[in-house]
Amino acid sequence: MKQMVSFQCMALALFLFLLLGSLPPSISDAADVLDVEAVVCRDVVDRKPVEPNTSFPNTVGKVYCFSKIIGARTPTRISHVWYFGNAERMRISLPVNAASWRTYSMKHIHPHETGIWHVEILDAMENKLEVINFQILNR
């Protein structure tokens, strides 16, 4: 009887291991609670933001959204979703491969694209983690 219970426990443990090991990454990512520190800046050098700000001249050419992600227990992804006003202009998926990870995306800015912009940072399940607001000024 004791061997039968032991065998059933081992079989259940194997079943759970196989089941949990085969979940899609987006389902296993749901348990991660990610903390984000993010800025919009003029450049990224040596994995650090350069000249972070909330406003830039329309001659800037390009800006970067730099994100430091803390808390990922397993490899996952985040998205940077760039908006000009309320119109989505670009969406990029970025890997997060460690518990503390830095990543960034870049957006070209044309001189006529003056006004209010923002970047939404989403987790793998499309939950909003952070919103960074900035503006492009006519100069």
Image (cartoon, grey):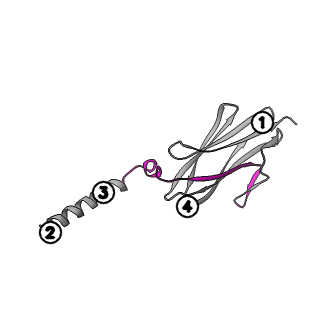
Mark 3 touches mark 4? (CB < 8 Å): no
Q: Nearer the viewer, mark 2 or mark 3?
A: 2
Q: Can you identify the residue that label 2 sits on?
A: 2
Q: Nearer the viewer, residue 46 or 123?
A: 123
Q: Can you identify the residue that label 3 sits on?
A: 16
Q: Can you identify the residue that label 4 sits on?
A: 99
Residues under labels 1 and 3: Cα distance? 53 Å
Question: Picture coordinates of residue 53 (x, y %)?
Answer: 78, 47
Residues under labels 2 and 3: Cα distance? 21 Å
Does dot 4 land on a helix, a strand or a loop? loop
Tell me which residue sits at (27%, 60%) in the image: 14
**Mark toward the start of the polypeptide (2 vs 3):** 2
Point out the stretch of residues depicted in magenta: 21-46
Q: Amino acid at mark 2?
A: Lys
Residues packed near mark 2 inside 10 Å, few (<14), some (14 to 19) or many (20 plus): few
Residues packed near mark 1 inside 10 Å, few (<14), some (14 to 19) or many (20 plus): few
Question: Picture coordinates of residue 27 (x, y %)?
Answer: 43, 48
Tell me which residue sits at (75%, 41%) in the image: 134
Q: Amino acid at mark 1?
A: His
**Mark toward the start of the polypeptide (1 vs 3):** 3
Tell me which residue sits at (79%, 38%) in the image: 136
In the picture as drawn, the residue positioned furthest to the left comes out as 1
Mark 4 touches mark 1? (CB < 8 Å): no
Q: Nearer the viewer, residue 33 or 19?
A: 33
Q: Is residue 28 left or right of residue 131?
A: left
**Mark toward the start of the polypeptide (2 vs 1):** 2
Q: Nearer the viewer, residue 45 or 27?
A: 27
Q: Is residue 31 left or right of residue 81?
A: left
Q: Nearer the viewer, residue 76 or 12?
A: 12
